[in-house]
Image: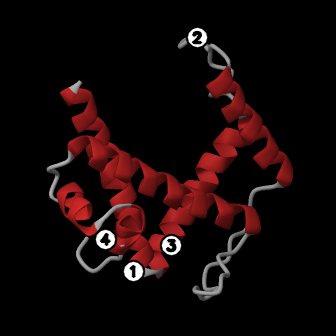
Amino acid sequence: MCASGLEEVLSITYGSSTVQHVLSAKAYARALRVHFLVHGALTYILMQILQRGCCCDDNMLCSVDLDPCLSAGDVAEVSSTVDRSLTACICVTDSTVVACASLAITNMLLSDLKQTLCSQLCTARLWLLYMHYIYINTVKQFIASE
């Protein structure tokens, strides 16, 4: 991820020596936290794009149009489902959370958005690959270390 902007993003929160330790995997717990924060921030940006229907921004060209985008009802249902899953004690066998139709729509639109961005924008492809590998590899390593 050299020259991708990751070091600059991390240096906003952490010092330069900490960033070097995180990126060289010397500070594992902090690196895990950092990668989850970056993954969450990138997911937030993708969800904002889904809600607006295009990725127009001051720093971006509006080259990606989405049809359809998330409706306000879908956003509200996904938000209440996430809140319910975080605050309530949910049994592992309870499939009502997974059966949420808006969650399935959001997942489908998110996958479509990622494919569209990967095919049209090189930098987006880099960051989406980062999200994919960090999510898979970091979670695997974390589970193995525990």
Sequence-first tag of 1 and 4:
4
In front: mark 2 or mark 4?
Answer: 4
Sequence-first tag of 2 and 3:
2
84 or 31, which is in the foreground? 31
User: Residue flagged by tag 3: what amino acid is it?
Assistant: Leu
Q: Is residue 53 left or right of residue 63?
A: right
| Residue 101: image location, x then y, percent | 73, 37
Please state, as top left, top right, bottom left or bottom right, where the N terminus lies in the image.
Answer: bottom left
Dot 4, crowdedness within 10 Å: few (<14), some or many (≥20)?
A: some
Q: Mark 3 = which residue?
A: 117
User: Looking at the image, is 6 positioned above or below residue 91?
Assistant: below
Residue extending farthest to the right is 73
Question: Disc 3 on helix, strand or loop?
Answer: helix
User: Residue flagged by tag 4: what amino acid is it?
Assistant: Glu
Q: Residue at x 36, y 74 (%)?
A: 8
Q: Mark 4 = which residue?
A: 7
The type of colouring in the image is secondary structure
| Residue 2: image location, x then y, percent | 23, 75
65 or 126, which is in the foreground? 126
Q: Mark 2 = which residue?
A: 91
Sequence-first tag of 3 and 4:
4
User: Residue flagged by tag 2: what amino acid is it?
Assistant: Cys
Sequence-first tag of 2 and 4:
4
